[in-house]
Amino acid sequence: MTELSVVPVRGKAARQYLEDLAHLRITVFREFPYLYDGDMGYERQYLKTYSDCEDSFFAVVLDGDQVVGVSTAIPMRHEESAFQQPLREAGWPIESICYFGESLLLPAYRKQGLGVRFFQLREAFAQSLPGCQYCMFSAVQRPAGHPLRPSDYEPLD
């Protein structure tokens, strides 16, 4: 490992990283608890939602010039309707919510405090958004006895 850097970028400035971020998402999301078999087409489209939005945020972790992690945030009003719908049905005001998207790191870069840094950066971003009152994120929860749960798995909660 060389010296790590966390590069905060907004909107279209993240486009230079999109291919690497799509690969990173596929790699990390194959792991437990996600167990997701992604494809580049979907990942490019998903990330385009963020990179097309000037109000989006990316904290890109670089080891030299290699992308090894990312954390994202976006005002919920710009997120896909599938993320908005449960909130609308529960009566939450979409315009006042900042959605914290993924926080992903390759295994060799975990347990070094980057997760805490991700939250600090995303919270600061959310505070900069006019009208933002709430932050939220989604999590995948699997049963404790899931057959694919690694013996050394540590949940993020």
Image (spheres, rainbow, N blue to C red):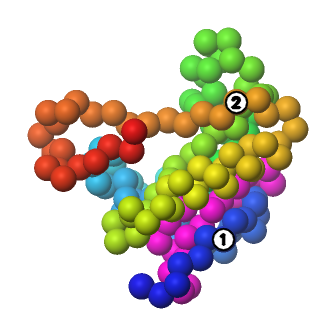
**Pointers 2 and 1 in contact (CB under 8 A)?**
no
Q: Read off the residue under disc 2.
A: 134
Image check: 12 left or right of 120?
A: right
Q: Kindly state the secondary structure of the residue where label 1 is placed.
A: strand
Q: Dividing the image into 4 quarters, which one contains the N terminus?
A: bottom left
Q: How many dots with numbers?
A: 2
Q: Mark 2 belongs to which amino acid?
A: Tyr
Please give the name of the residue rendered at 81% of the width and 54% of the height, measured from the top-left corner: 54
Image check: 52 left or right of 39?
A: right
Is 76 one of the magenta-colored residues? no
Q: Mark 1 belongs to which amino acid?
A: Val
Q: Report x, y in % for residue 69.
A: 50, 66
Please give the name of the residue rendered at 43% of the width and 37% of the height, measured from the top-left corner: 139
Is 50 one of the magenta-colored residues? yes
Q: Mark 2 or mark 1: which comes first in sequence?
A: 1
Q: CA distance from mark 2 to mark 1?
A: 24 Å
Above or below 87: residue 143: below
Q: Kindly state the secondary structure of the residue where label 2 is placed.
A: strand
Closer to the camera in the image, 53 or 8: 8
Above or below 138: residue 112: below
| Highlighted range, magenta | 48-71
Please give the name of the residue rendered at 74% of the width and 20% of the height, measured from the top-left corner: 93
Closer to the camera in the image, 7 or 101: 7
Q: Read off the residue under disc 1.
A: 7
Res 8 → quadrant: bottom right
Please give the name of the residue rendered at 29% of the width and 54% of the height, measured from the top-left corner: 31
Closer to the camera in the image, 34 or 6: 6
**Residue 156, numbered circle:** none
Q: Report x, y in % for residue 129.
A: 82, 42
